[in-house]
Image (spheres, rainbow, N blue to C red):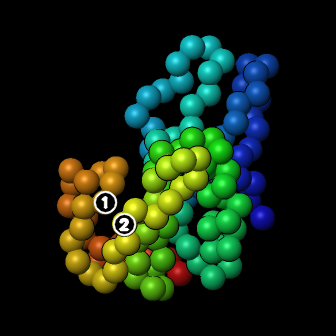
Amino acid sequence: MIPLLRQRRRRGEIHRVFDGDFVAQAQLVVGQRQLLAPDWICEVLSPSTEAIDRGKKLRIYARERVAHAWLIDPLRRSLEVLALESGSLEQIEQHHGDSAVRARPFDAVELELRALWSTASSTL
């Protein structure tokens, strides 16, 4: 099993590292010791990881104040968009099929879901 938050030593200091499939962060670390969670994280679901991705990982991401999470399920051809609300990551959008969508926090850009499925199916 892949650790959700790993600790890595660098120059004598311990740093926590997120272990999501994809992460994005608008800011770099501020100050010498302050650690920031990513602004967005994406998990690509598979039958063997779905329970961990939806359960333990989402609870950790919420605790660490990750603002948005995407759950991509290539088998169901679905994209779930979650946002941090009242201390937990709650679903705010759900998209299916091959349509073009705008999904937070990247809603300024249109995303072709069809491109996700063709890429994901070649790796499963």
| Residue drawn at 24 percent across, 67 percent down | 101
Q: Give the label on residue 93, or none.
A: 2
| Residue drawn at 30 percent across, 73 percent down | 113
In front of the other: 69 or 32: 69
Answer left or right for 54 relative to 119.
Answer: right
In front of the other: 2 or 11: 2
Few, some or many residues within 10 Å of mark 1 (<14, 14–19, 20+): many
Q: Residue furthest top?
A: 31
In front of the other: 93 or 22: 93
N-term-proximal mark, 2 vs 1: 2
Location of residue 33 with respect to 37 vertically, above or below: above
Query: Is residue 118 something one can see in this rendering?
Result: no
Image quadrant in which you'd find residue 74: bottom left
Disc 2 to disc 1, C-alpha distance: 8 Å
Q: Position of residue 27 (x, y in %)?
A: 44, 29
Few, some or many residues within 10 Å of mark 2 (<14, 14–19, 20+): some
Q: Amino acid at mark 1?
A: Ala
- The reply to whether discs 2 and 1 touch (Cβ–Cβ < 8 Å) is yes
Q: Position of residue 124 (x, y in %)?
A: 53, 81
Residue depth check, mark 2 versus mark 1: number of the one nearer the observer:
2
**SS at mark 1 in the image:** loop
State the quadrant of the N terminus: bottom right
Q: Position of residue 25 (x, y in %)?
A: 45, 38
**SS at mark 2 in the image:** strand
The residue identified by callout 1 is 103
Location of residue 10 with respect to 114 vertically, above or below: above
Location of residue 106 with respect to 121 vertically, above or below: above
Image quadrant in which you'd find residue 111: bottom left
Q: Amino acid at mark 2?
A: Glu
